[in-house]
Image (cartoon, rainbow, N blue to C red):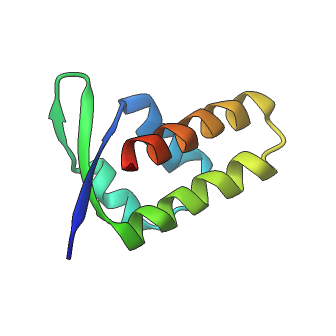
Amino acid sequence: MNEIEIKFTLQERDLIIDHTFTGPDLTKRLQIAEIKGKYLIVKYSTYDLDELIGFIAAEANHTEDKKIGKKLDRLFGGIRQERK
């Protein structure tokens, strides 16, 4: 199975864990990820990455906190761009 490496900042990790309904099967990787410089390096299968992106997008579209929504939108766009 092909895995894709995605870089996250600590703030992005916390945003996902604290503000989305992403399950432990996806967030555990964020919690134990290898740190390189200022980034966490996480490997996801394309299926798992699509699932993670879906949770981020759903919360970005449904949160009442506009500030959190904007941060999630940026994260969503960044992950999709990095995935290409």
> In the image, what residue occupies the spot 80% across and 52% down?
62
Examine the rendered structure and indicate whether residue 73 appears above or below residue 27. Answer: above
Pinpoint residue 72: horizontal percent, then vertical percent: 62, 39
Examine the rendered structure and indicate whether residue 11 appears above or below residue 57. Answer: above
Pinpoint residue 48: horizontal percent, then vertical percent: 40, 69
**Quadrant position of residue 47:** bottom left
Quick one: 80 or 24, which is closer to the camera?
A: 80
Pinpoint residue 20: horizontal percent, then vertical percent: 60, 53
Quick one: 24 or 77, which is closer to the camera?
A: 77
Q: Is 50 placed left or right of 3 in the picture?
A: right
Residue placed furthest toward the bottom:
1
Residue placed furthest toward the front:
84
Quick one: 73 or 16, which is closer to the camera?
A: 73
Quarter of the rendering occupied by the N terminus: bottom left
Pinpoint residue 82: horizontal percent, then vertical percent: 38, 42
> In the image, what residue occupies the spot 51% across and 47% down?
16
Task: Let me know if residue 25 appears in the view.
Answer: no
Q: Is 68 placed left or right of 44 in the picture?
A: right
Task: Let me know if residue 46 appears in the view.
Answer: yes
> In the image, what residue occupies the spot 77% across and 50% down?
61
Examine the rendered structure and indicate whether residue 26 appears above or below residue 59. Answer: below
> In the image, what residue occupies the spot 69% across and 57% down?
58
Examine the rendered structure and indicate whether residue 37 appears above or below residue 12. Answer: above
Total marks shown come to 0
Residue placed furthest toward the right:
64
